[in-house]
Image: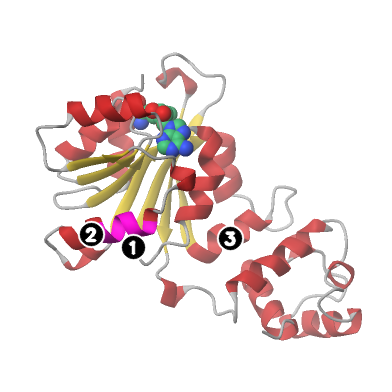
Amino acid sequence: MLDSEINEQLTAAANVGEGDVVLEIGPGTGSLTNVLIIAGAFVLAIEKDPHMATLVSERFSETERFKVLKEDFVKCHIHSHMLSLLASIEPSSADSRYAKVVANIPFNISTDVVKQLLPMGDIFSEVVLLLQEETALRLVESSLRTSEYRPINIFVNFYSDPQFICKVPRTKFFPQPNVDAAVVKFKLKQPVHYPSVSSTKSFFSMVNSAFNGKRKMLRRSLQHICTPMEIENALGNVGRPATSRPEELSMDDFVKLHNLIVKV
Ligand SMILES: C[S@+](CC[C@H](N)C(=O)[O-])C[C@H]1O[C@@H](n2cnc3c(N)ncnc32)[C@H](O)[C@@H]1O
């Protein structure tokens, strides 16, 4: 069972208020759901365990502000569910076209959640998650020239502005796990504000190839795209040395490099 303080922190981090539409993943018995509903939100929850889903649906049967889908988040068509929910709710403010995600997710689906939700800036304004602290730091704080800098950091910054809200020590949980957690907020960019690339698919494919040979220079690891000479010239145009390795390039550098060497 979670300390109620954590549910309050998650709800406050997303600034949940009257009329907000919130997606919750894995409500369990509904302790966070309850805080969200009290804050005035309409909650759409996705719960994989049918028994839990029935329990939580019974718990909130008195309110019209709660709906639960008995589905696995990883296989669920979030986009269509959210669009029909948003269309069914009377808009109370200009911002009510956008929903929020507030969730205390099982840690084993953290990457799936981040990869699925961050590119949904057309329906969500922010995604607030309780993550394992180590994952939170890797997603939010890893920066250039560190051994932790990975394609997922480029992905996170492409689609959002991430913020580490607070650490949640393991002592706040019962039973106590053997890792600490953290609240993280991803403010999602709207699609018009994504960095300008001709194709996101080819952009992330180039970034992944670059990091596949992490210790390799880009002029070697991207040879399947164009010649080493063309890569060196493009790096020069980006203002980077011809011998650059992937961990030396910021997201903006990768965007510029992609636009110079990939013709789609
Ligand atoms: C750590 S979370 C929930 C804790 C709950 N929010 C609370 O405040 O007590 C565990 C819940 O996520 C559900 N769950 C696990 N994997 C899921 C998935 N892939 N999709 C949806 N729900 C999932 C589990 O059935 C369980 O109810």
Closer to the N terminus: mark 2 or mark 3? Answer: 2
CA gap between label 1 and label 3 equals 18 Å
| Percent coordinates x, y for residue 27 in the rendering | 33, 33
| Percent coordinates x, y for residue 79 in the rendering | 37, 59
Task: Give the label on residue 86, or none.
Answer: 2
| Percent coordinates x, y for residue 40 in the rendering | 14, 44
Q: Residue at x 62, y 54 (%)?
A: 152
Neighbor class of circle 3 (other Cα within 10 Å; few <14, some 14-19, many 20+) is: some
| Percent coordinates x, y for residue 28 in the rendering | 34, 27
Q: Which residue is mark 3?
A: 155
Neighbor class of circle 2 (other Cα within 10 Å; few <14, some 14-19, many 20+) is: some
Seen in the picture, residue 76 relative to 61 is either above or below; the reply is below
Of 67 and 166, nearer the camera is 67
Query: What residue type is disc 1 on?
Result: Ile
| Residue 42 placement, left or right of 177 | left
- Asked whether disc 2 touches disc 1, contact meaning CB atoms under 8 Å apart, the reply is yes
- Image label count: 3
| Residue 39 placement, left or right of 116 | left
Q: Quadrant of ligand 1?
A: top left
CA gap between label 2 and label 3 equals 26 Å
Closer to the N terminus: mark 2 or mark 1? Answer: 2
Seen in the picture, residue 73 relative to 153 is either above or below; the reply is above
Q: Which residues are magenta?
A: 79-84
Query: What residue type is disc 2 on?
Result: Leu
Seen in the picture, residue 46 relative to 179 is either above or below; the reply is below
Q: Looking at the image, is mark 1 or mark 3 nearer the viewer?
A: 1
Q: Is residue 166 visible?
A: no
